[in-house]
Image (cartoon, grey):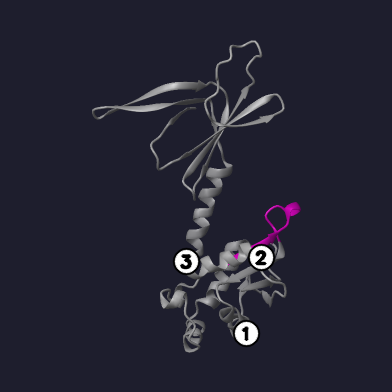
Amino acid sequence: MEIQIRHIPDTADKWEVVKAISLVVHSQSFTQELRDAGIQLVKGNMPLECMNFDVELDMCENRGRRNMTTGTLLLCLREIGVRFLRRVTTDLPARVQGKKIKFHMKSRGMTMDKIKKVGVLEKTRFIEPEKQEKRDKISFLLRDGFTTVRALHLGFILKEGKTKIFSSEFKAQKYGQLWIDYDQKVFRILVRAPRPSSRAPGILIFPPLARRTRGGRRILVYCHHIRQPQRARIGR
């Protein structure tokens, strides 16, 4: 069920709103009310105390990290949403920065992406906001705080007994950038190299990487899964 959130303090972040809603959703009186009504999650395999939900704030692009005082709450079942709206407007208000936030049922239907997300919420456990916030910060720093790459070596790792030797078959002595996707355990390297001369022999100079053209430069994109055997060595 999709619920509209209003009157959020514009300086509040997502995790402050999550904490406020969690105090209502995971309160003993609310979970007991759901049990008395016979409401279960995933055919009773998920405890109501671990009930998950999702919060998205409408952010204002022109005001930095401030929100637009509105957002969206996704709950995994409609029956839970109806009871949540009744309790949060009476004896279990949700407060952020000392201010009571308002909830309203959305009149329009949910998109397919949100319907799929609701199905996932019913099967996954709620994680404490402090842990989620820490994970998001790590993911942001690894993804957006990219590392400069000075040289990219492509080749093979050979084993001689217990010793591993890297055989460099190709070296791009060009500046590039490295991004790491913390959630997917994948790193991505973007290397910029000039186009080869038209007089050069017809030999494949670039390795079989994903290629895109921007202006007069060729963009080489290399993706690699961290859990697989390493095939690239980076010189910084």
> Sequence-wise, which precedes: disc 2 or disc 3?
2
Disc 2 to disc 3, C-alpha distance: 20 Å
Placement of 122 over or under 154, stated as above or below = below
Toward the viewer: 211 or 121? 211
Mark 3 vs mark 1, foreground winner is 3
Toward the viewer: 210 or 130? 210
Residue depicted at x 53% and y 43%: 142
| The quarter of the displayed image where residue 78 is located | bottom right
What amino acid type should be assigned to the residue bearing mark 2? Thr
Q: Which residue is mark 1?
A: 86
Q: Which residue is mark 2?
A: 111
Toward the viewer: 27 or 199? 199
> Sequence-wise, which precedes: disc 1 or disc 2?
1
Extreme-left residue of the structure: 161
Q: Which residue is mark 3?
A: 124
Disc 3 to disc 1, C-alpha distance: 25 Å
Q: Please, what secondary structure does the residue beneath circle 1 have?
A: helix
Left or right: where 167 falls relative to 99: left
